[in-house]
Image (spheres, rainbow, N blue to C red):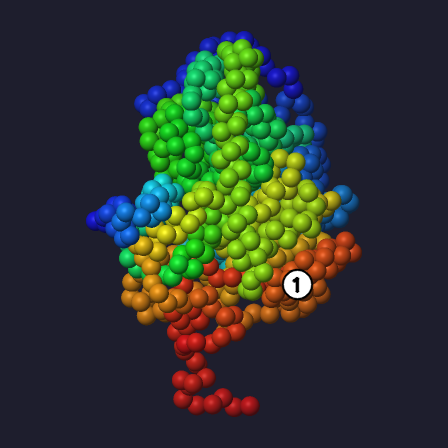
Amino acid sequence: MWMPVAGRAQGGGDPQVEKGRLVVAQVCTTCHTTLGRMLQVHKQTREQWRDLVFFMISRGAQVMPDEIDAVTAFLVATAGRDRPAARSPAPDSKTR
Amino acid sequence: MRRPSRRDFLATTAASGVALGMGHGMSAAPQDASASRLDNTLPKAEPQIYKGTAAGAVLAQLRAAGVKTLFHTNTSGFVPFWEAIYAAGDVTVINMTHEGQAVAAAAGYTMASRNLGFFFGSHVGIPNALSNTYNAWKDRVPLLLTFSGGQGEQGKDSFESWDNTLGPTEAFTTWRGDLESEDVTDTLRLAIKFAFGPPSGPVTLTFGAGGEKVEAPIHPIDLAAARTRSRAPADAIETIARWLIEADNPLFVVGSQVGIEGAYAEMLALAEKLSVPVAETMHSLYANFPNDHPLFVGELQAQRYPRKQDLLISFGESFTAGREDERGLTASGPRRLVHISHDPQALGRSFAPDVSILSDLRAAIRDLSDAVDALATRDRLARICSSRLAEVSARTSALKQSREIALRAHFDSSPITWERVGFELEKVLDRDAVIVPELGTQYYKIYRQLKLGGANKQRIGRTKGDALGWGIAAAFGVNLALPDRQVVALQGDGGFLFNQSEALWSIARYEAPMLIVIMNNHSYNESRARNMLNGGTFYEAGKDFNGYLGDPNVEFTKIAEAYGLKGEKVTRAGDLASALQRCLRNMRDGKAVVLDIDVEVDGAPISQPTWYQRHSIADVRKKKLNG
């Protein structure tokens, strides 16, 4: 049983994080029903989360322009990390 | 044909006892299709009598239905049919090198032309044909798939045969039969009726008609009227019209049947009449509504607006996507749900509407529009329309701004973003180009950069079946049907590797000037991202047994060249526009081009993205081979 998104956000009191929490609850959970689990698993930097927000907007997530920073702030507060996780594979690299 | 007046229709329906499908109790038992039928697909005119071979009678009946493009895959056993084709002189046979690809091409041709796709080949190719027969069935594409041979003795495991030859197709067909010399054209006419339904879909036939002499009736058949039609009861339409006028936050879901009927203009006019926001489901087969229109709000399941919908009307959507559609239908909480469909099997199948209506979409939309006009004054409609339009437009305009920000975020990055590919395609393609995609859920990143629907580009696909190995041949079929339009296949590298290079042979032979774009991220990224979404052992290890497609990195341009086609490869965003211009020049010269674009891998990153389970036969062998 996963806690509701509201219960897990760090950065309590930050109005930007709070705004982001509300948007995430409205926008992301319609498709990502396991969002709580995803945020436990995927820890990313601010830049990576911001890119992910862009990525989801392009895929149809209904995030308004003035909500992009807030959603990013919420994701960073909830599942942030200092160093980048792995990036996309270079097509010709051969890591095994 | 005269359009029946509502009064005529009421009289007819009253006489036949048609009931309203209203309320949850009724939704599970939609209206009786036969009772509300307007047209009878049985030909009324006296038939001409054909005298000749049974195979010739098949061709004569097909020609009388306007079917003059046939798809074929190599086999013996059709000599009398070939002789008839040769004698007819006006029939084109498109050879494909694999039955599955032939079925996909026939499906693409049919979706674009609204004609009937006809395939003939060997029964041993039935297993090859199955995956795209399944796709065609999911897409409700009327096809006749005919197979020679296979009528071996039951139970004997005879040469090239098995019991119940057409049995493997049973799950994906609306009917199966035997085209024998006796009653050959009656069987064929029946097959056409089953193909168009509703529900429409593939029909499989054994093709036993050969050189036997027959006298067979040939009926003229109008394929445009072949689907049995139905029309909504007037009081149901009136109820919905009243709900629509009174609703504060209605939403339309526009589905594939709008595209199948080509009722785009009617749909647009009705939405504009009351400024109702319009959504689509994630597996919508066509661009049924212009996606640059201020009322278009995107995918149903992603709907955030209107937040508290009080009425949702689905126009011809079958809601087959399962959980995604279910979430879209339930996300806004309780509201009135109306489901209009020309397919009785779709009604009330995936969810329980308050009203389910069996009707042709074009007729239902027109009837609803007329009923709205009759129930509300022009002033009232104008008031509803203007206030809602301002609100919806503000929303869709803001979402467009967000997409623009997302597009610009990595505009010049390499590997190239999907958004950038869509952006560049929109700049160079004709306004009425036809896009035939077979992509994962990244498709939306391209779609929303393209102007699709209405007077803009058309989209056909991705197939709702999602069985990979459909897109290139389907696009070729579209090009056959629409030779004056630019046709663009949008294909993932992983999907292309599902037996699709064979289609290039036909594309080259028949000089289809298509653009085939390979969105090459060197991976099955859809499944990789889904597999990693919720973490787990392999995510933590950063290893993915399924997703990485590099090593070897396939040179798709060389595959193109092997078929005598031009290949282009682009790895940098800045080179994309000029490469596209070169592609278009080749297309103008009548040549297809394969454009291989290195695109980003998106979704959840993993620490060892190019890892795969290593196994080398060369290393494990105990002895080296001679030579």
Q: Quadrant of the C terminus of chain B?
A: bottom right
Q: Position of residue B238 (x, y in %)?
A: 47, 14
Residue B420 visible in this rendered orientation of the protein: yes
At x 43% / y 48%, what residue is drawn?
A68
Residue B389 lies, with reference to residue A64, above or below; the image says: above
Say which quarter of the image contains residue B623.
Answer: bottom left
Q: Secondary structure at mark 1?
A: helix
Rendering quarter of residue B573: bottom right
Q: Is residue B107 above or below residue B257?
A: below
Q: Residue at x 65, y 36 (%)?
A: B455
Q: Nearer the viewer, residue B260 or A50?
A: A50
Instruction: Tell me what residue is drawn at x 54 percent, y 71 percent.
Output: B553
Q: Which residue is mark 1?
A: B575
Along the line of sight, the residue nearer the viewer: B111 or B578? B578
**The N terminus of chain B lies in which quarter of the figure?**
top right
Q: Is residue B514 toward the left or the right of residue B330 in the image?
A: right
Q: Nearer the viewer, residue B477 or B53?
A: B477
**Residue B541 on image: x %, y %:** 32, 70
Spot occupied by residue B470 in the image (x, y as percentages of width and height): 55, 53
Asked whether residue B12 is in view, the answer is no
Identify the residue at image location x=59%, y=43%: B459
Instruction: Classify 10 Å Cα crowding around label 1: few (below 14), some (14-19), many (20 and above).
Output: few
The disc numbered 1 marks a residue on which chain?
B
Task: Answer above or below: position of B494 versus B457.
Answer: below
Q: Is residue B190 left or right of residue B20?
A: right
Q: Is residue B375 left or right of residue B606?
A: right
Percent x, y for residue B568?
67, 64
What amino acid type should be assigned to the residue bearing mark 1? Asp
